[in-house]
Amino acid sequence: MSPETPAGNVWPIWEVFVRSSRGLSHVHAGSLHAPDAAMALRNARDLYTRRNEGVSIWVVPAEAIASSDPDAKGAFFESPQGKDYRHATYYTKSEGVKHL
Amino acid sequence: MSTLPETTTEETTHDGGHGDISVGVATAGTSGDATASATRITPGNALRPEDIALAVSRGTAKPSEDVAEFALRLGDDALILAQRLGHWISRAPELEEDIALGNIALDQLGHARSFLSYAGGLNGKSEDDLAYFRSEDEFRSIELFEQPNGDFAVTIARQFVVSYYQFELYSRLTKSTDATLAGIAAKAVKEVDYHRDHSAQWVLRLALGTDESRRRMIHGFKVIWPYVDELFRDDDLTARLTAAGAAVEPSSLRADFDRLTGEVLAEAELEFPQVPAALGGGRQGKHSEHLGYMLAEMQVLARQHPGASW
């Protein structure tokens, strides 16, 4: 899981996810360079939790993340546009149903 | 014996240039909503140098003469190291390491501010009075702390020794009969624990990395090791403070220091350098030629513009 430092002495990039408190999700905070996973965690601590932002950190090699193609926005994200019925708010509430 | 102020008292900040932080309890957590950001910012809640300065000015915390001298020693150690480490910012091998060393420098500076605020309580001096308006022979720091940065490996070797020493010292000081020393140590020991980890990680990586990095790590330890001895020397002051339960004899830290640093060195396939100990004398104000230059740079602004703040 730990990418080797490639030739040319450039450390690989890691994406950093920080959870700010118990019960919340880890949120992407940014990225950094590090020679390996252990140092990436420590660098993340130094860079992204300097103001009490977190209680937990994940680091992921950037190359391990597959991302959608920005040029394929249409094909990827057009479909839900205009399909209101996919949202719960579209429906009228039946009489007598509480706590909805 | 001094007593510390309740850190939870509602207190408007005194006029010390820190008006952006009020003394009190930090806001607890977030509301837990879906928009909670990854960058929640709270100052947290810990003993701050300002709290100590306040307690000193009110007379609720006043060090004995011995305790003040001891606090001055530890404060000077941390201050001089912070100044040295600060030099790495913008010069470290990688941007991330700039920040790592900068963070360690800021931790050390925080410890220095607390110790010096407390030490100054003896004669009504502020942390700034002590940091900027004492001359070289009035500094009580051990020679190790003023050693030049050298290359990255020398800095790591110095940091490694300092962190393991400070961890042993502060973890014992948390039980000091002097409440303020115990309070400063309790905050500092957790931070120093991280400094240990940071420097040990780098010792391993440099020692087990390339031929060049290993050569430099070995050289770094060789340069730094003569100054290790002075850290563990007892004197009349430490004897009196130990008898009073306020501190411990430096020599009593040596066994744990040797054992724990030895474990890391063994893992790094290195040996303790066999070098004669330097003379030392920092606790009496005798310093190497390096300190004067450092102080000139560190103090020039405060001496040119006394009382300046921003």
Image (cartoon, coloured by chain):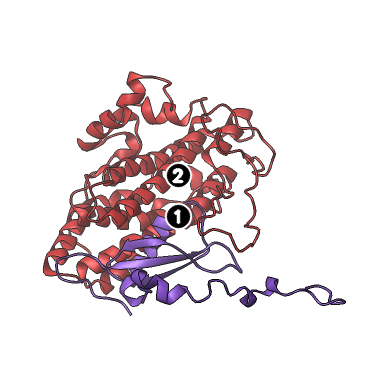
Chain colours: A purple, B red
Q: Where is residue B289 in the image (x, y as percent from the top left)?
A: 19, 35
Q: Which mark is residue B166?
A: none
Where residue B29 sits, quadrant-wise, is: bottom right
Identity of the residue furthest to the front in this view: A82
Identity of the residue furthest to the right in this view: A96
In which quadrant of the rendered image does the C terminus of chain A lie? bottom right
Task: Check chain identity for marks 2 and 1: say if they share one.
Answer: yes
Name the subunit of mark 2: B
Q: Nearer the viewer, residue B16 or B190?
A: B16
Q: Is mark 1 on a helix, strand or loop?
A: helix
Q: Hey, what amino acid is under mark 1?
A: Glu
Q: Is residue A95 visible?
A: yes
Q: Are marks 2 and 1 in contact (CB under 8 Å)?
A: yes
Where residue B258 sits, quadrant-wise, is: bottom left
Q: Which mark is residue B111?
A: 2
Q: Hey, what amino acid is under mark 2?
A: His
Q: Where is residue B286 in the image (x, y as percent from the top left)?
A: 27, 35
Q: Position of residue B299 (x, y in %)?
A: 32, 28
Q: Could you give the CA–CA distance between mark 2 and mark 1, rounded to whole angstroms? A: 10 Å
In which quadrant of the rendered image does the N terminus of chain A lie? bottom left
Q: Which mark is residue B191?
A: 1
Q: In this view, does B50 lie to the left or right of B224?
A: right
